[in-house]
Amino acid sequence: MKRWPAAGSLRLRLLGATLVTLALALTGAHAWLAGLFRDHVMRQADLALTQQLDQLTARLEFDAQGRPGLGPRAMSDPRWDRPYSGLYWQIEPLHGGSGGRAEALRSRSLWDGSLQLPADALADGTLHRHDITGPRGESLRALERSLQAPEPFDSRWRLIVAGDLHEATAAVERFTGVLAASLAGLGLLLALAAVAQVAVGLAPLRTLQQSLQQLRAGRRQRLEGRFPTEVQPLIDDFNGVLERNAVIVERARAQAGNLAHALKTPLAILRHAALQAGPGEFPALVAEQVDTAQRHLDWHLARARAAATPHVPGQRTELEPVLRGLLRTMGKLHADRRLDLAADAVAPGLAFAGEAQDLQEMLGNLLDNACRSARGSVTVQAARDGPWLHIEVQDDGPGIAPEQRAAVLQRGVRLDETSAGSGLGLAIVVDLARLYGGDLTLGQAAAGGLGARLTLPAAP
């Protein structure tokens, strides 16, 4: 489906919406103002005709036979006497009285014509208005009222005054034309102002585009420039993403270097063994070094995965299911030692704000380390303290001397060189916990062994 050409242009959208709204507003203003002026002109015309009709009514007199006529004072407007002047009066009898046999009286301006009004039921004194055609085909505005002759006559008469609407119509047309021209000029100025407003309003986006081009070309490391307060939060967030990506890239480079360095030693040992070791020594040496390399790979992969996840919103991992599954696994793995694995002191509903795989990695290393050292029992306690989740794994083994606790958290350090492992378990836990903003601390358990306290962000 084709898109409207302006759909991809913010400038055209703003201009289109502004110009359409402006056109509708000016068109409505023209119709409204022209209507107001037309009504005003017609009211003035009606008012002038009403005054003429009042004057005609005041001059009307009846003779001894009940016939109407005008008094000795003539009508004041000279147009009454000029033929077809556009101002006319007419007095005609209404049917129903003795005046029905009388002739109508007309102004000289009608000459040999007459005013033709539609049949109308008029009450005495009531004023009616009509738009009619004059004696020369012109448009006239007519006002009429009825009048009862004085006693003893029962005749009723219709008094009519009509005026030409040519001047009023011409005035309305002139005003409508001037108004249209004025509103068109105003619309043009407002349209130019809208174009200037859009250009000025979108100027920061042009600055943003130039800054992005410089960023893509490598001349800048972040977006720089002066931006409006409405755009600045977007710039700040984008710069934050750039900074975080730079940190991730730098961390990836460091991890790649560390992994290469960690694998260099096992590979060199394997190469040396392949050249000099005896037939019976080589398989055991290969298995040991491959296990060491695998542990290094697992550690670096765990760091790489966790480095990208702590800032992902909405992550939630329930603690109880993960812990229950790990205890079952450790019970089977160390079944020959008949250990008592307990997690009774874990508050319900606790959740970790991170990935389940990372939580399993950290707790798995702590539980495995505790099971290797324990004499008969391993206990797990967990509670929430504000935004933090505290998990403590305790065993009843020999524990670790205070002066040695900091050393065992370092990569590759093992206090017991006779046991299997590469000394990476606690180091993995420390690195993962710190990537989430937490930490791992070692202390003495209540049973005398080691107490490992893991602090992690708690999910809401």
Image (spheres, rainbow, N blue to C red):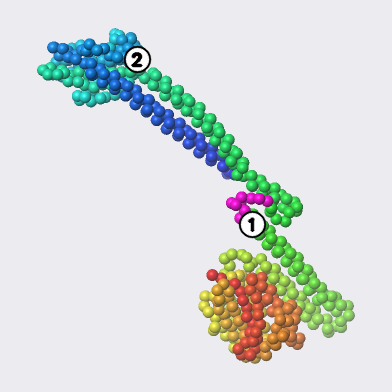
Residue indicated by mark 2: 86
Would residue 178 be counted in the magenta stretch? Answer: no
213 or 412, which is in the foreground?
213
Amino acid type for the residue under numbered disc 1 = Asp
Q: Quadrant of the N terminus?
A: top right
Q: Is the magenta stretch mostly helix, strand or loop?
A: loop
Q: Residue furthest right?
A: 276
* Residue 329 visible to the viewer: no
Picture layout, residue 196 above or below residue 57: below
Q: What stretch is highlighted in magenta?
A: 225-233
Per the rendering, the mark at residue 163 is: none
Query: What's under tag 2, amino acid-wise?
Result: Gly
Quadrant of the rendered image containing residue 221: bottom right
Q: How many labels does the image show?
A: 2
Q: Is mark 1 on a helix, strand or loop?
A: helix
Label at residue 236 = 1
Which corner quadrant holds the C terminus? bottom right
Q: Residue 412, position in %: x, y?
A: 75, 79
180 left or right, relative to 307 = left
Q: Which residue is drawn at 76% across and 68% down?
A: 254
Position in image of residue 373 (x %, y %): 67, 87
| First along the sequence among labels 2 and 1 | 2
**Residue 451 to residue 212: above or below:** below
Q: How crowded is mark 1: few (under 14 residues within 10 Å), some or many (20 or more)?
A: some
The residue located at (59%, 78%) in the rendering is: 390
